[in-house]
C-alpha cells in the first residue's frame, strides 16, 4: 500500500512538475518567498483574532474599533524584516485605536528569532564578526552592521562571568591541567597569550571543565596555576585525589600548597614524546617501543625488570639514559594503583582532546581584539563540547570501587553511604 503524501510533499511535486524550481538558487528564493507568505498570513490571522471579525464579515462589530490599513513603510511595500531565510517584507495591519500589538513580528523588531541564535552559533565556531557579517550577506542577503553583531554577542560576556564564578563540587577524583595559547592584542601589539584550562572528573565519573583562565602574561607559569587553584578552592573544591599535568617545573609544589593531600602525576605520554625528540630518527620507533614496555607492565616488579633491560640495551646512549633516569620515578609511581586507574592518571588525553577543539576556534583567526573576545569564544566552544559528555567515564564503577578501597574515608565522606 502506497504511503499517502503529506501536503508539503504534494506542493513540492507540483513545483517540480511546473519546473518552477530548477536550481539551488531557485530553491533558496522560493523558501524566502514562502517564509514571507507564511509570516504575512500569520500576521493577518493574528490581526483578525484581535479585531474579532474578518474583512468580509457582515456581522455587527463588538465595538467602534475598525481596521485602519497598514503601518506605513518607507517604500510602501511593507516593513523590512531579517530572518534566517533572508530579508522579507511584511505589511503590519493597523487598527484605529492603535491597540494591536503583533506577536509574530513585534513592533520595533527588525530581526526575527533565529538570526541571533545563528550569530552566536557562528561565533562559537570561532568566526570573527567580519566573518559572520560576510556569511549572512553572501548566503542570506542580510546585511547587519558589526556594531549590531557585537551587541548580539555582548550578552555572552555576562554568561561567561556567571559560568566562571559558579559553585563547583567539593570533591573531584581526578583533575587534568594544561595550557594552550592564542594571539591577543595588547596595546595594539599581537602577543601569544596563555589560556589555563582545568578539567575534573567527579565522584560519579562525570567530566566537566572547572574553568579556563586567560592570562595577561606571555608564557605559562606555575605561579599563575596557583591563582587557578586558589580560584577553584574559593568556588567550593575541598578535595582532589589526583592532579595530572604535563611536567611544568614547580607545579607539583604549587599543588601541594593549595591541596596538600592531592597526588600529582606526570603525564607518561608527554615523557614519551620528549624522549622521542632525543632519539635518532632511524632508531626512534624501536626506542619508544622499548620504553613503552616499562609503563605497560602488569606490576612494578616487571616494570623494574624492563627498565633494567632498557639500561643494558641503550648503555651507549647517554642522553637517552639520563632523560629516562630523571623521569623513571614518575613511571614507577603509577604502579601504586590498579591497571584501570593507571589508564586515567598516566595520560592527560582527556584535556588534550578538549584543547585540540579549542585550538580550532583560536588558530587561523588572526589576533583577538582583546581578552574579552577570546573569553566569549572559548566559553561558547566549551559549552558545545560539554553537551556531549553525558555518558561519563568508561569503566567508572570498577575504578570507583578501587578508589574507595584505596582512599577510604577521604572519598567515602562525599557519598551518601
Image: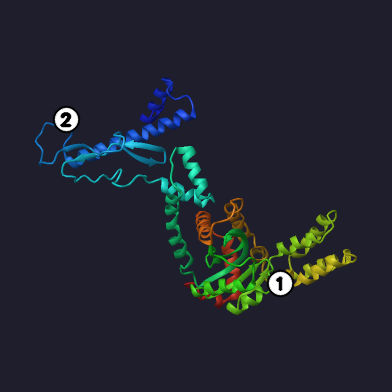
Residue lying farthest to the right in this orientation: 316
Residue lying farthest to the front in this orientation: 188
Please report the residue visible at 31 percent of the width from the left and 38 percent of the height from the top. Answer: 74
Nearer-the-camera pick, 75 or 226: 75
Q: Which residue is mark 2?
A: 56
In the picture, the disc for residue 266 is none
Q: Is residue 275 left or right of residue 119?
A: right
Is the residue 71 above or below the residue 13 in the image? below
Q: Is residue 6 left or right of residue 327?
A: left
Marks 2/1 in contact by CB < 8 Å: the verdict is no
Q: Which residue is mark 1?
A: 333
Please report the residue visible at 46 percent of the width from the left and 64 percent of the height from the top. Answer: 161
Is the residue 293 above or below the residue 1 in the image? below
Q: Position of residue 163 (x, y in %)?
A: 46, 64
Q: Position of residue 137 (x, y in %)?
A: 47, 40
Colour convention of the picture: rainbow
Q: Position of residue 120 (x, y in %)?
A: 46, 51
Is the residue 49 above or below the residue 314 in the image? above
Kindly report the distance in space between the C-alpha atoms of the residues bearing marks 2 and 1: 86 Å
Nearer-the-camera pick, 213 or 146: 146
| Quadrant in which the N terminus is drawn | top left
Give the number of the mark in front: 2 or 1. 2
Amino acid at each position: 500500500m502506497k504511503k499517502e503524501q503529506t501536503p508539503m510533499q504534494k506542493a513540492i511535486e507540483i513545483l517540480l512538475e511546473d519546473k518552477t524550481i530548477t536550481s539551488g538558487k531557485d530553491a533558496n528564493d522560493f523558501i524566502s518567498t514562502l517564509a514571507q507568505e507564511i509570516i504575512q498570513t500569520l500576521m493577518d490571522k493574528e490581526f483578525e483574532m484581535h479585531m474579532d471579525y474578518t474583512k468580509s464579515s457582515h456581522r455587527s462589530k463588538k465595538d467602534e474599533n475598525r481596521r485602519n490599513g497598514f503601518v506605513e513603510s518607507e517604500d510602501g511595500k511593507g516593513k523590512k524584516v531579517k530572518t534566517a531565510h533572508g530579508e522579507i517584507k511584511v505589511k503590519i495591519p493597523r487598527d484605529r485605536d492603535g491597540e494591536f500589538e503583533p506577536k509574530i513580528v513585534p513592533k520595533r523588531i527588525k530581526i526575527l528569532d533565529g538570526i541571533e541564535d545563528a550569530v552566536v552559533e557562528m561565533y562559537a565556531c570561532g568566526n570573527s564578526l567580519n566573518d559572520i557579517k560576510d556569511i549572512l550577506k553572501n548566503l542570506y542577503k542580510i546585511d547587519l552592521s558589526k556594531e549590531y553583531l557585537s551587541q548580539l554577542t555582548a550578552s555572552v560576556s555576562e554568561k561567561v562571568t556567571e559560568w566562571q564564578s559558579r559553585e563547583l563540587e567539593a570533591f573531584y577524583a581526578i583533575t587534568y591541567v594544561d595550557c594552550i595559547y592564542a594571539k591577543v592584542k595588547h596595546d595594539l601589539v599581537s602577543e601569544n597569550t596563555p589560556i589555563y584550562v582545568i578539567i575534573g572528573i567527579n565522584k560519579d565519573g562525570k567530566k566537566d571543565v572547572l574553568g579556563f583562565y586567560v592570562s595577561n602574561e606571555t608564557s605559562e607559569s606555575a605561579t599563575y596555576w596557583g591563582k587557578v587553584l586558589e580560584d577553584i578552592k574559593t568556588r567550593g573544591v575541598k578535595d582532589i585525589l589526583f592532579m595530572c599535568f604535563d611536567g611544568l617545573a614547580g607545579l607539583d609544589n604549587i599543588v601541594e600548597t593549595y591541596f596538600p593531600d592531592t597526588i600529582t602525576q606526570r603525564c607518561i605520554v608527554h615523557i614519551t614524546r620528549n624522549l622521542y625528540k632525543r632519539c635518532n630518527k632511524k632508531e626512534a620507533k624501536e626506542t619508544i617501543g622499548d620504553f613503552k614496555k616499562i609503563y605497560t607492565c602488569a606490576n612494578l616488579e616487571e616494570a623494574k625488570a624492563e627498565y633494567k633491560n632498557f639500561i643494558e640495551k641503550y648503555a651507549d646512549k647517554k642522553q637517552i639514559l639520563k632523560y629516562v633516569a630523571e623521569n623513571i620515578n614518575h613511571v614507577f609511581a603509577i604502579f601504586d594503583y590498579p591497571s584501570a586507574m593507571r589508564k586515567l592518571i598516566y595520560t592527560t588525553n582527556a584535556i588534550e582532546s578538549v584543547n585540540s577543539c579549542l585550538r580550532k576556534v583560536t588558530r587561523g583567526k588572526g589576533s583577538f581584539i582583546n581578552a574579552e573576545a577570546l573569553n566569549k569564544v572559548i566559553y561558547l566552544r566549551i559549552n558545545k563540547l560539554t553537551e556531549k559528555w553525558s555518558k561519563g567515564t568508561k569503566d567508572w564503577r570498577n575504578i570507583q570501587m578501587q578508589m574507595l578501597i584505596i582512599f577510604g574515608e577521604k572519598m567515602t565522606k562525599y557519598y551518601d553511604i
